[in-house]
Amino acid sequence: MFPVRELAYISGELIRPSYLVRGLRENIAKYSQERRFAIAWFILCTFLSHVCGVRPLMQSQQVPDELLALRDEIDRIDNELINLLAERFSVTAKVGQLKAKNQLDSVDPVREQEKLERLRQLASDKSLNSDFILDLFQMVFGEVVKNHRTFLK
């Protein structure tokens, strides 16, 4: 194996070559022939770049360490967001079960409006696009209601 730090997009998916090389043996069969070729080409280009100093025309410039560190931080934050969403959906599942047990409606429009208004204010306070935040949470609320309705069956 050779040291690789660059990131690349292969078939629209962000690939970390170190992960790619580690998981290649187990996972190569699940990829299409086109994707396997793209992976092999990427590994070859990266190898030539590091060992011989050859940089194919299609490969991007060396990614600065600072950018890699920031990307790692973004990855960490994304993981936290996923964990927080999983925790939120775990709690809302309990809410859905409680509503079903007590024969309450899955939707509480008053609470939803109050919550959206509070989220709009929080977004504004953090200089975030409030329309984006409202759209995001309306999608979350929609998923919660859909999950709640499964408890009514």
Image (cartoon, rainbow, N blue to C red):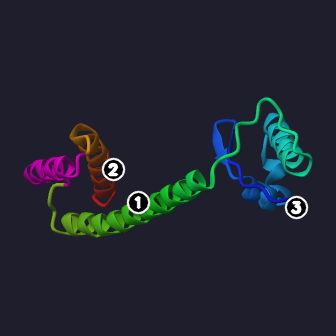
The kind of residue on which mark 2 rests is Glu
The kind of residue on which mark 1 rests is Leu
- Residue at 81 percent across and 59 percent down: it is 3
Magenta stretch secondary structure, dominant: helix
Q: Do the residues labelled 1 and 3 touch (CB within 8 Å)?
A: no
In the figure, residue 115 lies in which quadrant?
bottom left
Query: Label 1, label 2: how many angstroms apart (C-alpha)?
Result: 16 Å
Q: Is residue 70 visible?
A: yes
Q: Are marks 2 and 3 in contact (CB under 8 Å)?
A: no
Percent position of residue 149, x then y: 29, 54
Location of the N terminus by quadrant is bottom right
> In the image, is 4 to the left or to the right of 117?
right
The residues colored magenta run: 106-127
Residue tagged by mark 2?
143
Q: How crowded is mark 3: few (under 14 residues within 10 Å), some or many (20 or more)?
A: few
Q: How crowded is mark 2: few (under 14 residues within 10 Å), some or many (20 or more)?
A: few
- Residue at 78 percent across and 59 percent down: it is 23
Which one is in front, 26 or 48?
48
Q: In this view, does 101 lie above or below 3?
A: below
Query: What is the secondary structure assignment of the residue under circle 3?
Result: loop
Percent position of residue 131, x then y: 23, 37
Residue tagged by mark 3?
1
User: Which is in the foreground here, disc 1 or disc 3?
Assistant: 3
Residue tagged by mark 1?
81
Query: What is the secondary structure assignment of the residue under circle 2?
Result: helix
> In the image, is 122 to the left or to the right of 41?
left
Q: Is residue 88 above or below residue 126?
A: below
Percent position of residue 63, x then y: 66, 47
In the figure, residue 66 lies in which quadrant?
bottom right
- Residue at 52 percent across and 55 percent down: it is 70
Q: Does the magenta stretch include residue 109?
A: yes
Q: Does the magenta stretch include residue 144?
A: no
